[in-house]
Amino acid sequence: MPTPDNEKSMTAEQLAEKETDLYSIVLDLNKEKQSLETLEKLKNIFISYRQIHRLYANIADKQEEALKRGLFIQWYAITEPADLTGISELDEEAELNIIKILENKIQTESLDSELKWMLNYYASWDYVFDRFKNFEGLKNFIQNRTEGYFPSVIDHLSMKMRGQMGKYWNSLNVLKNENAKK
């Protein structure tokens, strides 16, 4: 179940598929009675998710989508229980890489509109970024966060293809489905 090292060149789309598979296993494990076997399977999922996050971090400077998903995974790992998400402790170097790229985008004012609203949302859990207080741009962003960027409508179909991040955004009732029949 852990992601092999030879998958270093996986695309964001392939990583999203891996995430979907892992999340399905997590949901199934939560239906089972806890045993040594289920705990071992969950431990392997944690390892796999750590690797997926690391792979997103490795391509985040070249692919904005990887940055968004890597940042989501970091936020989700802290805000939600690991046994429900499959996401546990992440690689600190990979987390730092995501934050450095994010900091650069904040400092150069090059966050796209989607990343802006996502980061504003994550910033309402300010403790998530406590370890990164030395990043001035991020610190100022969090201090000045606003809900003004948060959309009322998202494309639920495209979110379905974006790993666990997409599943999360699709689960929020405040975001209407852009694809719904009017």
Image: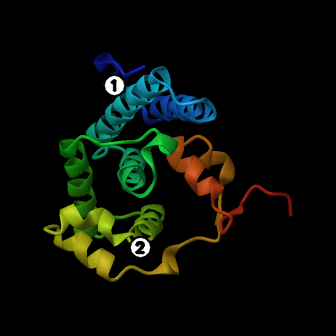
Q: How busy is the neighbourhood of tag 1: few (under 14 within 10 Å), some, or many (20 plus)?
A: few
Mark sitting earlier along the chain (1/2): 1
Q: Are marks 1 and 2 in contact (CB under 8 Å)?
A: no
Residue 124 is labelled as 2
Which residue is rendered at x = 40% and y = 48% of the image?
73
The residue lying toward the viewer, choosing from 123 and 77, is 77
The residue lying toward the viewer, choosing from 116 and 34, is 34
Q: Position of residue 117 (x, y in %)?
A: 47, 68
Q: Position of residue 81 (x, y in %)?
A: 45, 50
Q: Position of residue 133 (x, y in %)?
A: 18, 69
Which residue is rendered at x = 34% and y = 83% of the image?
144
- From this view, report whether residue 105 is shown above or below residue 83: below
Residue 9 is labelled as 1
- Amino acid type, residue under disc 2 in the picture: Ser
- From this view, report whether residue 141 is shown above or below residue 132: below
Residue 161 is labelled as none
Q: Position of residue 72 (x, y in %)?
A: 42, 53
Residue 108 makes an appearance in the image: no
